[in-house]
Image (tube, rainbow, N blue to C red):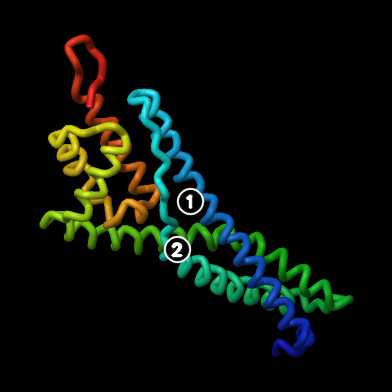
Amino acid sequence: MIQTLMPGDVFTLTAIIMMLSSLVVIGLLFYGRYTRKKKDVVKEAVKRYEETKIFTDPKMKFDLTVLIFWIGGAFLNVLFSLCLFVAALIYVNAVLDPPILYVLVGFGISFFAAVPMYLITQFMANGVLDAKAVKGLVRTVIGSDGTKKVISLVCTKLGIMEKETVDRVYEKVRDKIRAAEYSELTPDEMLAISKAISENSADVHKPDGIFRT
């Protein structure tokens, strides 16, 4: 049926362009989300610097699980876009001339369809990442030396040395941290630790009203 709608080589070229378009758009959207999270972490680090005069720029790791949903989302977007394109051609009974118009229209459909497809795959990705967090929770409930070490290292880099303070921060975020090493911290994890430290600081006051950690 495809052969009756467009030449075979044009169909192949259209599918390739659609795939490239989907990969670029969905990939940029996922990367944009990661960048926004990273900016939030930097803001927290600057806030801590203003309070402690100690600045640390953590080496945050991009969760490679997202790659599965990036590529899978792009593939699904191509299938959806091709089905939509073919259905439109059948409905209007149109023949595009010159054949390059097939490629351009296919590109346009896949480009705009990539946005809702990204929202769907992001929702699915968050579900998987949450499942990974649950595994981290099981690990931390029984007490993870690796998690405690990571949180302690972050606190130390922020000038927080008191064991009681570190323990309170650990209790607040232990169900959110999956990283076993400092270099494995993701933006979400670093932000959670920073917020827990800020919340702890807000709960503890010196007699003169100045926050302390």
> Residue 7, position in %: x, y?
79, 86
User: Foreground residue, 205 or 120?
Assistant: 205
> Residue 105, position in %: x, y?
76, 68
- Image quarter hosting the N terminus: bottom right
- Element type at marker 1? helix
Q: Residue at x 33, y 48 (%)?
A: 189
> Callout 2 environment at 10 Å: few (<14), some (14 to 19), or many (20+)?
many
Disc 2 marks which residue? 66
Query: Is residue 16 toward the left or the right of residue 47 in the image?
Result: right
Q: Are marks 1 and 2 in contact (CB under 8 Å)?
A: yes
Amino acid on which disc 2 is placed? Val
User: Which residue in the rendered view is the most extreme toward the right?
Assistant: 98
Query: Is residue 70 toward the left or the right of residue 84 in the image?
Result: left
Label placed on residue 34: 1
Tell me which numbered mark, 1 or 2, is placed earlier along the sequence: 1
The answer to whether 158 is drawn above or below residue 94 in the figure is above
The answer to whether 87 is drawn above or below residue 209 in the figure is below
Q: Residue at x 15, y 40 (%)?
A: 167
Query: Is residue 2 toward the left or the right of residue 169 in the image?
Result: right
Q: Residue at x 16, y 37 (%)?
A: 168
- Element type at marker 2? helix
Q: CA distance from mark 1 to mark 2?
A: 10 Å
